Structure formats: C-alpha cells, structure tokens
Amino acid sequence: MRLRAHNGLMILAAALSAAAVSGWMTAAAEPAAVHPFTEALVTNQTGDSLSVVSLADMKSVAEIAIGGNPAGIAMSPDGKYAFITSPESKELVVFDADTRHVAKRIKVGEGPLGVAAHPTNGRVYVADWYVHKISVVDPLAGQVVAQIAVGDSPSGLAVTPDGKLLLSADRDSNAVSIIDTATNTRLKSVPVGKRPFGITIDKGGRRAYAANVASDDVSVIDIAAGTVVGTVPVGHRPYAVALARGRAFVTNQYGSSLSVFDLSGLQPVKTIDIGDHPEGIMADRTGANIYVSCWFDNVLMRVDTEKLAVTGEATVGDGPRAFGLFLR
Amino acid sequence: MVRAVALALGALVLFPTFASAHGPTRQKVTETVEINAPADKVWGVIGNFQDMSWHPAIAKTEGTGGNDANATRTLTLTSGGTIAEKLISNDPAKKIYKYEITKVDPKVLPVNNYSSNISVKGEGDKSTVEWKGAFYRGFMNNDPPPELNDEASKKAVQGVYRAGLDALKKKLEAGG
C-alpha cells in the first residue's frame, strides 16, 4: 500500500511535467479528433519492425526497426502515438507516429501481446500471455501502475467508447473478462467459444465480438448483460474482427479468407478470399474500407466493404500481425 | 538423404513435452524446387493427400476421407515417430492443398500449431513446387532451451521440406 501511494505521487508528478511539455494530457482528455485515417502502422513480427503504409495510395513509406518481435498495437486517442507490444523483449514500445521514432520502451511482464489505449485517462492496458494478468501502464511515466487478474493467457483487449469497461479475451480460459477501468477490477467472466483471441467492441459500446480460434466461430457478447447473445460460424482459425456497414469482417488465418456476417441477424453474407494467414483487421472511420494484414504474404490488403472485394495491397515487412487498432 | 532426415528427426527424441500456451512469435518457412517435368505430372505424384511416399522420411501414410476437406492422415516416419494431419482444403485445378498438424510430439517435430500448403505452378515442361509452413516453436513457454527455440523449429521444418522437394525432383527427373 505504501509503495502504491508513493508510486502514485511520483507518477502524478511525472505526468504533469511531461504533459506540460508534450501537451499529450490535453489531447488525451478531449474526444479523439475525427479526421480520416491516413496511415496504417503494421507490426511485422518476424521482420522485427513497423511498416508505415500510406492509405491514399497503398504504398509503404517507411519501415522502422522496433525490436522484440512486435505484435500488438494500439493508438493514443489523438493518433500521435502507437503503443506496440514486443513479446520477445517483454516490452511496451511507445512509438511517436508523427516523427516515426521509438519514444520509450517500458518493461511489462513476461509475455505482452494484446494492447488497448483508454480513450480519456491516458492509460494503456497490456495483456500478458504468460502471467495471466493485464498490466495498467502509464506511458508517460513509463511504469506499470496496476495489474488486473484475469483468466488464462489474455490476448485481445478492447475498451468501450465511454472508457468505463475493458474487455479481455482470455484465450486459455475460453472466456471474456469484463473489467471496471475505474477500479481495475474484474466484474465478470463471460464463457465464450474455444480459444478467443481478437475482440472488438461496436461504436455504441453495446456488443463485443470475440474470434474463437479453436471453435471456428465468433461469440457475440451483450456487454451490459454480460452474456453471449449469439455464436456465428466463420472460417478456419479466426483471429480478429472488424465492424463496418452493419457487418462483421473476420480474418480466418488457415482459411486465407474473410468471413462477412450481418450484425442484426447474425447471418453469413459472404466469404472473401484474401492473402495467406490474414490477421490484424480494422475498418476506416467511415466503414468504406477495411484493412487486413496478411502474415504469410507480407502484405496489407484493402477491402471495399460495399463491393466485398480486395481493391488494393501494399507490401510490408516480414510477418505482419497488426494485432489491435493500427490505423491513424 | 533418408538417413539425414531420420537422424535430424531422431535427434529430437530426448525432449519433454509441454501443455500450455504456445510461444509468442509464429515462424514461417518457404522452400521451393524447380523440376524438369510438367505440372500435371508433378501434381500426380504429390497431389494425393493419402500418399506421401514421395518423401524419403515417410515410411507409411494411413488416412481416411480421401482428398476432401477434413480428410485425415497419419504419417509414420522412417525414424518411427508419427504425425497426425488434417486436410484444410484441396484445389486440384489450382494444384494446391492446405493442411495442418493435429498431433505431433515436439520430440518428433519441434513445432506447435503447424499449418502448411504445398502447390505446383507449371510453365511448359518445367514446374515449380512451393512448400510453405507456419508454426510456433517446440517449447511453448518463455525462454526456450536452444533445442526447442524458434531457430531450431525453423531448421527442422526446412530440413523436412528440403529433403522432400529434392527427392521429388530426383524422382521425377529420373523418369519415375
């Protein structure tokens, strides 16, 4: 307890001084600026780097060494910083996306993987594959300020748009934890399909979609009720989910495809062939396009959500995962 | 060649098995071979999921389900170990099939969550066979011993692919 209070003061002081310099706290306290995304930041795990892709022309414009085989990624609410997990070096890497350089490296647990940024409080949540906890990180202070016990091998993380709840796909518990971000405590564990990995929350904060790697389906969770309201069969080894135009788009790693289903009726719409081992997936702000990193083929693909077809691709580094929110 | 693969696989017999989460970084291996034979002929040798006799490390293939998705096979290695596999998809028109390992002891092949595809592309009398694998290392936790780390798993898979593709080339170009 004494340690925590001490740390709290240190962190507050550090945060205030850093905020004065960077203006970050001000930015973080305001709603995210609503400008169209212009770049994708793609973590290349085997390439040990980050590719910056210009979305306007689907061209890689930079590849920056990261270290520690980066996998997970989240963005600060203003899009200026990327928070990248490097599981092999057990770090959270803070990347300044405007200047394209690594701003800070923070040691986090034993196997950092999934990561999410809070919309307003400046905290970054890092799921630990081996320690079965979520670390709450203050990226300004460069410190872990709290840990939240969850299920086994937490993977994907997502925060509700109002910032009140954090959801964790606890892969080896076949469950999703719902966590109160004000108290950093788990409110509930919701049983889902087998081996949930990626998790995505809708814009209204009402439902969450967990991709279940081992049962080849997606669990649809009513967040307020804390229950599964639907299970949708998808392709082989689903990884993550993006939402656009009232539909879910699911990357199927072994299927080399995207499963598309309708959010209201939870009925299948189409399966789209895509590159080998599609993984990280995210929609742009309007939902007109989604972007998919294809791990084996080393490309980021753009899919038109109306035509339901691939309309562009950019070559990136080796083994792109982009596990999380990677557009800015 | 047979002996080399058998030795490589046999050398892994000493390591214990684990039952928790896999390692954090998936590995990939791609090996290719150019063969002086038309693609149809090459596919005729490798396209049957139930017959892997073209690979020198495989002593026996036993399976069910033929060449349809979800067909299974158990490969018995010349070294004695077994690998259980499942066909994910098969497209004879495009000459590609995808499969995964459903059960293997890391001491037989030091990999986890292994998936793969093998394909043939032809141009006249020549073909290129490509064999791709995606997998995690044999040791599923942090700080693996060197024998079960990322490099060791990649090396083992590369060895299997290389031995198979080189033997395939030899067999086809010899007129077999």
Image (cartoon, coloured by chain):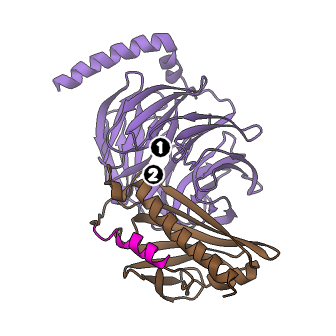
Chain colours: A purple, B brown
- Provide the chain ID for the residue under circle 2: B
Residue B117 image point, x, y percent: 59, 69
Q: Is residue B93 magenta?
A: no
Chief secondary structure of the magenta portion: helix
- Image-based side of B66 in relation to B127, left or right: left
Residue placed furthest toward the right: B124
Which residue is at the front of the view, A18 or B61? B61
Residue type of the residue flagged with mark 1:
Asn
Would you say residue A187 is visible in this rendering? Answer: yes
Which residue in the structure is indicated by mark 1? Answer: A69
- SS for callout 1: loop
Distance between mark 2 and mark 1 Cα atoms: 7 Å
Which residue in the structure is indicated by mark 2? Answer: B25
Q: Say which mark, if any, is on residue A21.
A: none
The magenta segment: B1-14
Residue placed furthest toward the left: A2
Would you say residue B21 is visible in this rendering? Answer: no
Which residue is at the front of the view, A150 or A264? A150
Residue A21 image point, x, y percent: 48, 10
The structure residue drawn at horizontal position 45% and vertical position 34%, both measured from the top left corner, is A163
Residue A234 lies, with reference to residue A122, above or below; the image says below
Residue A194 lies, with reference to residue A71, above or below; the image says below
- Provide the chain ID for the residue under circle 1: A
Q: Is residue B13 magenta?
A: yes
Residue type of the residue flagged with mark 2:
Thr
Query: Residue A34, located in which quarter of the rendered image?
Result: top right
Query: Residue B65, located in which quarter of the rendered image?
Result: bottom right
Residue A93 image point, x, y percent: 45, 32
